[in-house]
Image (spheres, rainbow, N blue to C red):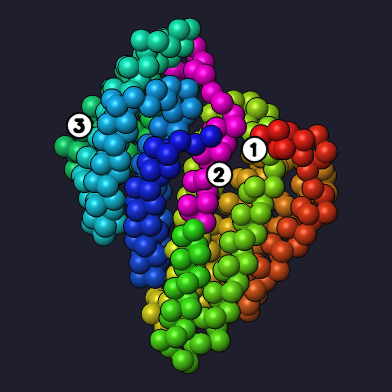
């Protein structure tokens, strides 16, 4: 079960995710689609990777003593520094503050892994690889800041790949302990945080509606449909028993890495709704069809990756066909005059099928046992 410290830890990520979604919204509204999406992907990777590493570490080595708590709070401070640099990353492609906050988070994790190595038993080689690997990559991050901006934006991809490689190498030296229930609970909680951003977008539509009488009906409609879509995404994500799904993929890391797309899509969905609101109120450089893609693409990605990671391995053929088809149909919604309404209808249909073809009795029993 998630500890109070882990829930406290998540609070700073709410701030970082919210700021990132706001900046993505502004970039999309201004028509800076490519640069906005790339900046969002880079910033969100930093947020997600730090969160994921702590989550997997905590499931195996949470001592909850005073030093563990202090190091966790140090990581939280790094998240806040990162959040302070998000605006510069989007508007000026200046990642210095973001990188500084990120390095603070990662060096705190190095200390955590070194502490864990003393009592890790068979997993000791893995813990040392984690510590050394993370430390080495942070040296590269700091060195990269000395490069010209254009070169840095190219090198950043290689640094992300280096970060992703550390767990792969470390786990090959001796798997660290993990608790499938705890890990998937933490992923579910973070998903709820991100879906909460979409509910905020729905509330913003109501606020704009009160202030703009001419667009009252469309804005209220957007608010209602956003709530319906967000509820459908919640239903789809939590329909499969994730603690069973994580053991069905070839490696638990695939489950963990795949969630980058789920999390990033959930955050981008809220930004897309804000863009749609701007279109309705005449404050966007994007056309209506283009603006619709800013939320249908994230929805399709969210559903598609949840289907691949958690639904497809255990679901019936009917469920698999309907969920996959639903994701594809959402993608083409912007060519329809009422894309948000159609998206809500499609997702309602997907949810109806999931209700009709609920988890098997065996899966229900496993959920009750939890």
User: How many angstroms separate mark 1 from mark 3 (CA)?
Assistant: 39 Å
| Residue highlighted by disc 3 | 143
Eyeballing the image, is 167 above or below 73? above
Does the magenta run of residues contain 171?
yes
- Circle 1 SS class: helix
Residue occupying image coordinates x 43% and y 79%: 207
In the rendered image, residue 170, in percent from the top left (x then y), is placed at 44, 17
Q: Would residue 29 appear left or right of 369 to someone viewing this image?
A: left
- Circle 2 SS class: helix
Eyeballing the image, is 247 above or below 15? above
| Residue highlighted by disc 2 | 188
User: How many angstroms separate mark 1 from mark 2 (CA)?
Assistant: 9 Å
Q: Would residue 71 appear left or right of 333 to someone viewing this image?
A: left
Point out the stretch of residues depicted in magenta: 169-195
Q: How crowded is the residue under tag 1: few (<14 C-alpha within 10 Å), some, or many (20+)?
A: many
Q: Is residue 345 visible?
A: yes
Residue occupying image coordinates x 43% and y 11%: 120
| Residue highlighted by disc 1 | 242
Q: Are marks 1 and 3 in contact (CB under 8 Å)?
A: no
Q: Are marks 1 and 2 in contact (CB under 8 Å)?
A: yes
Does the magenta run of residues contain 328?
no
């Amino acid at each position: 079960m998630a500890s109070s410290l882990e829930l406290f830890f998540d609070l700073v990520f709410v701030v970082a995710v919210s700021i990132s979604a706001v900046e993505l919204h502004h970039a999309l509204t201004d028509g800076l689609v490519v640069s906005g999406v790339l900046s969002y992907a880079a910033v969100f990777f930093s947020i997600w990777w730090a969160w994921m590493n702590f989550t997997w570490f905590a499931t195996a080595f949470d001592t909850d003593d005073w030093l563990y708590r202090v190091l966790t709070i140090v990581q939280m401070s790094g998240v806040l520094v990162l959040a302070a640099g998000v605006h510069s990353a989007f508007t000026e492609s200046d990642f210095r503050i973001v990188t500084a906050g990120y390095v603070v988070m990662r060096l705190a994790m190095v200390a955590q892994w070194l502490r864990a190595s003393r009592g890790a038993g068979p997993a000791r080689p893995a813990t040392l690889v984690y510590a050394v690997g993370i430390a080495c990559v942070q040296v590269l991050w700091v060195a990269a800041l000395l490069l010209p901006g254009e070169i840095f934006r190219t090198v950043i991809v290689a640094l992300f790949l280096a970060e992703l490689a550390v767990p792969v190498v470390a786990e090959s030296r001796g798997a660290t302990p993990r608790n499938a229930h705890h890990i998937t609970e933490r992923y579910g909680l973070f998903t709820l945080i991100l879906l909460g951003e979409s509910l905020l977008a729905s509330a913003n539509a109501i606020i704009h509606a009160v202030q703009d009488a001419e667009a009252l009906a469309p804005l209220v409609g957007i608010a209602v449909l956003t709530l319906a879509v967000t509820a459908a995404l919640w239903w789809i994500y939590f329909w499969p028993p994730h603690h069973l799904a994580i053991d069905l993929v070839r490696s638990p890391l695939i489950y963990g890495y795949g969630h980058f797309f789920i999390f990033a899509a959930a955050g981008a969905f809220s930004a897309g709704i804000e863009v749609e609101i701007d279109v309705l109120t005449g404050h966007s450089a994007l056309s209506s069809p283009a603006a619709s893609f800013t939320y249908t693409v994230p929805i399709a990605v969210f559903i598609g990756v949840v289907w691949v990671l958690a639904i497809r391995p255990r679901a019936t053929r009917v469920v698999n066909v309907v969920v996959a088809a639903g994701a594809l149909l959402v993608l083409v919604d912007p060519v329809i005059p009422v894309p948000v309404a159609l998206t809500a209808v499609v997702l309602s249909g997907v949810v109806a099928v999931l209700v009709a073809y609920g988890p098997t009795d065996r899966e229900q029993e496993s959920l009750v046992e939890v």
